[in-house]
Amino acid sequence: MQQVPVSLWTLVAGIVVTAISIWIGQNHTLMPVQASLQAPLVDGFFNVMFTIAIALFLVVEGTIVVFLIQFRRRPGDDTDGVPIEGNLPLEVFWTAIPTAIVLLLGIYSVDVFNRMGGFDPAGHPHSAAHAAHMPGSAIAATLSDTSQATTAPSIAPTIGIGASPQTLNKPADLVVDVKGIQYAWIFNYPDSGITSGELHIPVGADVQLNLSAQDVIHSFWVPNFRLKQDALPGIPTELRFVATKPGTYPVVCAELCGGYHGSMRTQVIVHTPEEYNSWRTENQIAQQQNLNQVVAINPGDLSTSEFLAPHTHDMGISAATLESVVIGQERRD
């Protein structure tokens, strides 16, 4: 019986490994539902990396299994193995292939980052609520911003995911100032004066988030959008994206920021344009009523947490979180 050449077995194994890797890499269910214009770009890159990882896993583990069977010790065989020293073609092969893979993935990742807006070099306008980092309670500062009209923007270079090549030099449809505090996210809408504990945006709108942090480093992460950006104390950062699917998606702090880091969660609600306009109108009316009530109350009769409680409740911030922020600020003062 004629023996099958090793080269033919290698070719067949390569075809099988390639087919399996491509199928698994393109048909896995590891990622959550895509809900932004940037998500397919990230998923495409992830699928390529996952396909390569599957192929490497099958090659390495398959070789180990073959060698365990082919070169196992037979009963009664006490001889030494065949002495093998060096194989230049093999060493060049296993060095050149990983090098090429890393270089190609690096070029691909740079292209994805640029198409998402990571290389936007221009300065961007930021409202006073985002640009100013004043001492004092983060919640009180944010609430005071809601009673003022939108101020003249200041131009400052930012880091993060900015305008894509398609939207470069074009203003965003919606700008939201996002402040991270231990342990909550506060969203301020400069165009309407609304302050909320949840992010509400219309589907299909070009949204720009101006991120800042009051105390320590936080990280704003929306898994369904495939976007994550650090919020840094004293350094403005930006996240610009377009939501493509109405729904409610989790917002997670992805940077260890303290003892209650795990509870620093909220959600982004993507509305249809009609639903978003309705939400904005209702909240503008409700917030104006709350501000009128604040004017009628003598703040000297209330503690800081009691004074802010009615407003933070509407923003989705718990009483425990509010109390911890106030106590922490009092200690810093």
Image: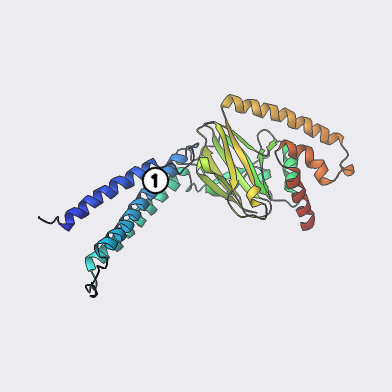
The answer to which of 84 and 73 lies nearer the viewer is 73
Q: Where is residue 160 in the image (x, y as percent from the top left)?
A: 53, 49
Q: Is disc 1 placed on a helix, strand or loop?
A: helix
Q: Residue furthest left?
A: 1
Q: Which residue is tagged 1?
A: 47
Q: Can residue 131 be seen in this view?
A: no
Q: Quadrant of residue 152?
A: top right
Residue type indicated by callout 1: Asn
Neighbour class for label 1 at 10 Å: few (<14), some, many (≥20)? some
The answer to which of 187 and 156 lies nearer the viewer is 187
The answer to which of 1 and 298 lies nearer the viewer is 1
Q: Where is residue 94 in the image (x, y as percent from the top left)?
A: 29, 62
Q: In which quarter of the image is residue 331?
A: bottom right
Q: Image quadrant for the N terminus?
A: bottom left
Question: Residue at coordinates 61% horizontally, 46% vertically from top-left?
Answer: 211
Q: How is the image coloured?
A: rainbow
In this image, 107 relative to 307: left or right? left
Q: Image quadrant for the C terminus?
A: bottom right
Q: Is residue 282 visible?
A: yes
The answer to which of 244 and 56 lies nearer the viewer is 56
Whether 289 is drawn above or below 169: the answer is: above
